[in-house]
Amino acid sequence: MIGIFDSGLGGLTALKELKEILPGEDMVYFGDTGRVPYGTKSRETIVRYALQDVRFLRGFSPEAILVACGTVSSGAMKELRESFDFPIIGVVEATARSAANVTKNGKIGVIGTSATIRSGSYTTQLKKINPDLEITEKACPLFVSLVESGFITDGDEVTRLTCERYLAPIREAGCDTLILGCTHYPIIAHEISKALPGVTLISSGKEGALMLREILEKNELKGRGNGKINYYVSDDPEGFSQNAHIFLGDNIGGDVKVVDIEKY
Ligand code: DGL
């Protein structure tokens, strides 16, 4: 079984990828819908939430866990890895590796939640790969709210203006590659691309999923299930069910159960 979690719906962009590349795996998805957003919280709170999320998933005896949240991947990986003995994979390393491979002019933009950008995790990782890369980071705190509120249709005026405002420094820096450092952002990729024509977008959820497959293969942990996916949230299962298809490109096809995450 593979465990996947995010603060809410965003991690489903990683699950979408996992369903395609690892169709035989059983998976449990947890969305912390009662405490979303994480990206505006302090590091201490994010660590506490992340430990609870993984303690909950530990009950399913996971082979590995994918942290399908840029915010947790940026601020809590050390504590998670010290606390559990199964592989826990974040999205930062895989996404930075892919962006460093893709860029032609060595100028990479990074957008994410306030907590992700504050952590500097992407710049640290990218500079480890190549110290000559020029990185421009920008926090886009309104994007998660826009996505969770459904301002996602092509041409949505509010999202278009917000993209223009937030992404101007990335355009001015001449970046040819942009890391979508939050797993919610692929849902508004169409508007992001309009503000940054010709820029290659790298989705952190997708890259994290690809790295998870790599690690399962390396540790010979792949293909132990029947492709069954169970969904848990900490609040509002109906809202989650209704909106999940936007992220997943498919209906979830089953129940969403509620868990009292504060107990963990
Ligand atoms: N989807 C999460 C991420 O990748 C963040 C959303 C939030 O702020 O909770 O950072």
Image (cartoon, helix red, strand yellow):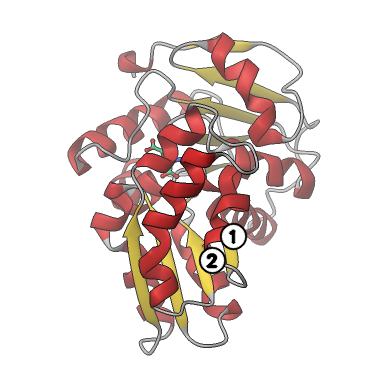
Can residue 127 be seen from the camera position used here? yes
Q: Is residue 246 above or below residue 238?
A: below
Residue drawn at x 70%, y 58% as measured from the top left = 217
Report which residue position mark 1 lands on: 193
Position in image of residue 203 (x %, y %): 57, 56
Q: Which amino acid does the dot numbered 1 rest on?
A: Ser
Can residue 203 be seen from the camera position used here? no
Q: Is residue 132 left or right of residue 24?
A: left
Q: Is residue 27 above or below residue 104?
A: above
Position in image of residue 103 (x %, y %): 56, 80
Position in image of residue 52 (x %, y %): 34, 27
Give the quarter of the figure containing the C terminus: top left
Tell me where residue 122 sits by quadrant. Answer: bottom left
Residue placed most toward the observer, 144 or 214: 144
Under circle 2, the secondary element is: loop
Residue drawn at x 76%, y 18% as measured from the top left = 253
**Mark 2 vs 1: CB contact within 8 A:** yes
Under circle 1, the secondary element is: helix
Q: Which mark is residue 24?
A: none
User: How crowded is the residue under tag 1: few (<14 C-alpha within 10 Å), some, or many (20+)?
Assistant: some
Report which residue position mark 2 lands on: 196
Give the quarter of the figure containing the N terminus: top right
Residue placed most toward the observer, 131 or 261: 131
Q: Is mark 1 within 8 Å of ligand 1?
A: no
Q: Which amino acid does the dot numbered 2 rest on?
A: Leu
Residue drawn at x 50%, y 66% as measured from the top left = 178
